Image (tube, rainbow, N blue to C red):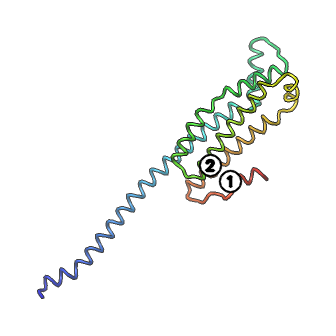
Amino acid sequence: MAPEVIAAIIGTPSILIAATAAYAAGRAQGRGSVDAVRRQHQRDAYAQFLDVAYTFSTSSRWPTCVARAKQEAREAGQSPGASQICIRAAELRVGVSTGPLTLASIVITLEGPDHLTEVASELVRRALAVHDDAAQIGTSATEELALIVTSLPESRQSDRRFIAAMGAFSHVARLHLNGNRPPRDVWAAERD
């Protein structure tokens, strides 16, 4: 056999191995940049969702709505009773839109992962519960309203539950973005 043929036979596996290794390294490097872009997009989506949730929370908190209702009454030169203040505060609370939060949660659903999507969905459900509590106050009869005005545990509880869900989402999102595993039970701290 000619020396050129022997050299070609011996060199071919080495060339194939080198080409395969170069191809795999190129794919890994390309995949790394795609992953980095995706992670940045997820981070932006999570930050936007938290921003919208924070805006909803600060605008719809019961004490904030009561203060706004009292301010409106003062500016109009009125001195309404507690029940009128309570009804107006409930109207203001219901007036805070959940639309931006719902739209931002759709992006979270698209970006995933599933455990984060579940927490985002729970946050939207809790925003709707804030509205439901306010709507119940706004449609109560005068006698029922007198009882509600003296203690507003449901409204404040809705606020606390929403804020807790914001914290849970932030925690799970941070774990995901840092490559850590999510907790088995996201809501364990809330039950304690």
Quarter of the image containing the N terminus?
bottom left
Q: Is residue 114 left or right of residue 167?
A: left
Give the vertical position of 9 relative to 190 (above or below).
Answer: below
Query: What type is the residue that disc 1 sits on?
Result: Val
Task: Specify which label sits upstream in the sequence, 1 or 2.
Answer: 2
Q: Secondary structure at mark 1?
A: loop
Q: Nearer the viewer, residue 140 or 116?
A: 140
Please tell me the numbered disc located at residue 118: 2
Residue 119 rendering spot, x and y as whole percentages: 64, 48
From the top left corner, tell me how far across and down residue 27 is, in percent: 36, 61
Q: Residue at x 71, y 24 (%)?
A: 92
Q: Residue furthest left?
A: 2
Mark 1: few/some/many CA within 10 Å (<14, 14-19, 20+): some
Are the residues flagged by discs 1 and 2 in contact, CB closer than 8 Å?
Answer: yes
**Amino acid residing under circle 2:** Glu
Secondary structure at numbered mark 2: helix
CA–CA distance in space, label 1 to label 2:
10 Å
Q: Which mark is residue 84?
A: none
Q: Is residue 36 left or right of residue 16?
A: right
Q: Residue furthest bottom?
A: 1
Q: Residue at x 80, y 36 (%)?
A: 154
Please give the residue where the numbered disc 1 appears in the rendered image: 186
User: Is 66 above or below relative to 169?
Assistant: above
- Image quarter of residue 149: top right
Residue at 55 percent across and 45 percent down: it is 108
Could you say where residue 176 lies in the image, as x and y percent from the top left?
A: 57, 55
Q: Position of residue 17 (x, y in %)?
A: 30, 74
**Residue furthest top as drawn:** 77
Q: Nearer the viewer, residue 85 or 135?
A: 135
Eyeballing the image, is 191 above or below 47? below
